[in-house]
Image: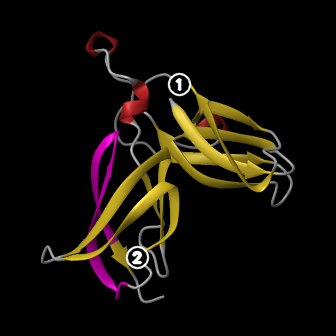
Amino acid sequence: EIEITVSSQLGGIMEVWLDGLGEEGEMIASFLIQNTGGDNQWKVFTKEIEAAYGQRDVYLNVRASPNAYNMRHIRFVREADPAVSVNKLSLRQPQIYPNPFSSALTIDLNGERGIYTIFDVTGNQVETGLVESMRNNAGQRLTPGMYIIEVKSKNGNFTQKIIKSNQ
């Protein structure tokens, strides 16, 4: 499954291709992006796709007028084995972006509440805070360098390396 999060006032079409555009590649999904209610009203669109294996180049072909929509992220979601009986929503990981970042991180918990903690490379806790669905100002006071962020929510724990840059 492919999942994209976009906001739009005008709409358009976004195609997802593997290994090239047109005859060189394979179109695996096409999204009709409709008005989401404005540039700050984000909506998730999903499409089922056939399994794709190996290392592949991904291309996005946008068919819309300039500035027709904003894309927050695109994710390839791997479905669980139905025999295991795992709720698909529990497999959703938080989105932490941009990475690297220069001013602040956004932590998106897909509508859930949670707690984040940032550690420096020696393991010292340097920042912690609450996330109410989404937080847009994590890491603002950090100095440039590499850190580890841990996010805890009812969907589980998630850890990721983050980098704060000078710019």
In screen coordinates, is 51 left or right of 117? right
Percent position of residue 42, x then y: 68, 49
| Residue 35: quadrant of the picture | top right
Q: Residue at x 36, y 42 (%)?
A: 55
The type of residue carrying mark 1 is: Ile
Q: Residue at x 30, y 83 (%)?
A: 145
The type of residue carrying mark 2 is: Gly
As helix, strand or loop, the secondary structure at mark 1 comes to: loop
Q: Residue furthest top?
A: 83
Q: CA distance from mark 2 to mark 1?
A: 36 Å
Q: Check the image and report above or below for 58 versus 145.
A: above
Judge depth for marks 2 and 1 and give the one in front. 2
Magenta-colored span = 142-162
Mark 2 or mark 1: whose residue is earlier in sequence: 1
| Residue 124: quadrant of the picture | bottom left
Disc on res. 139: 2
Q: Check the image and report above or below for 40 versus 5.
A: below
Which residue is under mark 1? 49
Q: Check the image and report above or below for 28 versus 157.
A: above
As helix, strand or loop, the secondary structure at mark 2 comes to: loop
